[in-house]
Image: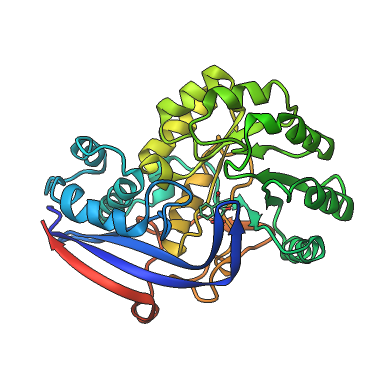
Amino acid sequence: PPVTGIELRRISMPLVAPFRTSFGTATVRDVLLVRAVTPEAEGWGECVAMGEPMYSAEYAEGAADVLRRFLIPALPKDADPYGVSRALSSVKGHRMAKAALETAVLDARLRASGESFAGFLGAARDRVPCGVSVGIMDSVPELLDAVQGYVDEGYVRIKLKIEPGWDLAPVRAVRERFGDDLLLQVDANAAYTLADAPHLARLDAFGLLLIEQPLAEDDLVQHASLARTVRTPICLDESIESAAHAAAAITLGACSVVNIKPGRVGGYLEARRIHDLCQAHGVPVWCGGMLETGLGRAANVALAALPGFTLPGDTSASRRYFATDITAPFTLEDGHLAVPTGPGLGVEPIPEILKEVTVDTEWIPL
Ligand SMILES: O=C(O)CCC(=O)N[C@@H](C(=O)O)c1ccccc1
């Protein structure tokens, strides 16, 4: 059955606490949702682009514009999920916008056929172990309190955001307070340069799982050089926007772990290709997060259940970011999230909550 139209919906989700990274502090999540409507079912896609182009070049308003003017008009009416990326390939870049549209079409098709996202993607587990991302804080004591809270909630892995001036001290304090058994990693969001290699090598003393994206997103060669200086495994995030990027990074020795974010790489089909490629090379992957609502979170948890996702991801409970999620909340059980089993994403927005957080909605007939 044809896709009869697409809804672009902007929602504004207040965060339970400010979330500070090396590129800024967020207090609200400005989200663009895409809804694909067919006579049989409708599907949802969540665009992970932030409100401002600080993490990557994309941003919510820009994604809405490129969807409205270029991507949706290029969508064939009988769009099947595999055909969507081909139909959109004439538009350069805008992977997060493309991912949201592809996911909405995929979700609609799966809801109609009754197949779950997990089943379609090839999930191997019915629940996934969850890590949590901890922002940069004003002081080490404040950080230790936050980490204590997450450890008490049962998170199996802690990720600390770092930047020049906030790295060795917080990592040392967490390692000393919580001991050597705590699974611990850091994320620099590209805040360092190769000149910082000797400084970053001092993180080797803390038994970290990995150092995520220490250098700029297009510094594959520099990351390969850093990997020869630092013993802690290098993980890439911003640098990996496709399976081709992952292949290049592995060939160059730029990373030995990959953070897969479906939105960043253009969708769940490309995310699975990266998973398959990394598995073939013995490179562990984990599922990153972009403060998704329950819609994106549901799809990420399904992806995180694939066999090659051997490290806990940033698939936290809904309450990590939102007091009220737009779907039934994902709640941590014994450090794990259950993989949704219903058709498609297996979750849907709660109408009255969605209405409350909606800033703008726009219907685009096909
Ligand atoms: O748990 C989550 O959803 C967020 C995990 C996280 O730290 N995301 C980071 C990142 O760089 O990976 C991020 C946050 C905000 C915006 C972009 C990226």
- Camera sees residue 254: no
Vertical order, 311 against 243 (above or below): below
Question: What is the x, y in percent for residue 259?
Answer: 55, 40
**Is residue 218 positioned above or below 153 on the image?**
above
| Residue 108: % across, % down | 26, 55
- Left or right of 174? Residue 293 is left
Tell me which corner region of the image, top left, top right, bottom left or bottom right, holds residue 341: bottom left
| x, y percent for residue 294 | 46, 64
User: Which residue is located at x 44 percent, y 40 percent?
Assistant: 122
Considering the image in quadrants, where does the C terminus appear?
bottom left
Near-viewer residue (103 or 16): 16
Residue at screen point 34% across, 51% down: 115
Where residue 21 sits, quadrant-wise, is: bottom right
Front residue of 307 and 33: 33
In this view, the residue in front, 78 or 84, is 84
Q: Is residue 154 above or below residue 263?
A: below
Q: Is residue 311 left or right of residue 230?
A: left
